Image (cartoon, rainbow, N blue to C red):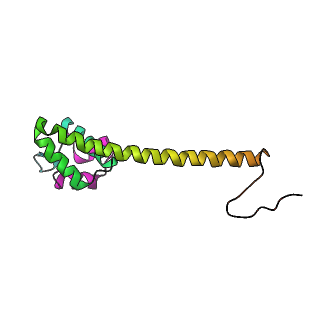
């Protein structure tokens, strides 16, 4: 069994976040030790890692609660859970394309600057007029 602090160390989750998730019912069936402190087993830790991933995927607390509720319905709710995850994946893929476009822009700018600095091409700007050398 793991303490809250140990679970935070294992998962990288902040203590306050884990406590909030527990209080919100996102970590169901939390066990308590003889001193009434929360304790977690390996399955809990695996679930908490899943919650962290869902959060990084852009899932909010309300959505996570809905997902947890579906998980409690067992196998019959798999199609609904798949649909939720498919929507999140679609959003992540869109964000990934946006990030890739930004990286392409930066790569292009870096190449432009390298070419200007090496004398391969003259400097041009969309912001200022550059006098032409005569």
Residue under the point 42% across and 48% down: 95
Q: Is residue 48 visible?
A: no
Residue under the point 28% across and 41% down: 86
Q: Is residue 103 visible?
A: yes
Residue under the point 23% across and 39% down: 82
In which quadrant is the C terminus drawn? bottom right
Outermost bottom residue: 128
Which quadrant of the figure has residue 71?
A: top left
Q: Nearer the viewer, residue 5 or 69?
A: 69
- The image shows residue 128 at horizontal and vertical percentages of 71, 64
Specify start and end residues of the magenta stretch as a single range: 1-26
Relative to 130, does residue 5 appear above or below in the rendering? above
Label the magenta part by its dominant secondary structure. Answer: helix
In which quadrant is the N terminus drawn? top left
Q: Is residue 81 left or right of residue 34?
A: right
Residue under the point 11% across and 37% down: 76
């Amino acid at each position: 069994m793991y303490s809250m602090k140990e679970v935070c160390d294992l998962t990288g989750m902040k203590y306050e976040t884990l406590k909030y998730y527990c209080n919100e019912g996102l970590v169901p069936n939390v066990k308590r030790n003889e001193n009434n402190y929360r304790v977690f087993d390996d399955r809990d830790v695996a679930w908490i890692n899943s919650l962290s991933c869902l959060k990084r995927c852009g899932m909010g607390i309300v959505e996570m609660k809905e997902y947890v509720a579906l998980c409690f319905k067992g196998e019959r709710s798999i199609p609904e859970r798949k649909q939720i995850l498919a929507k999140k994946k679609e959003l992540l893929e869109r964000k990934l394309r946006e990030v890739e476009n930004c990286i392409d822009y930066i790569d292009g700018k870096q190449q432009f600057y390298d070419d200007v600095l090496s004398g391969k091409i003259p400097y041009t700007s969309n912001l200022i007029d550059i006098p032409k050398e005569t």
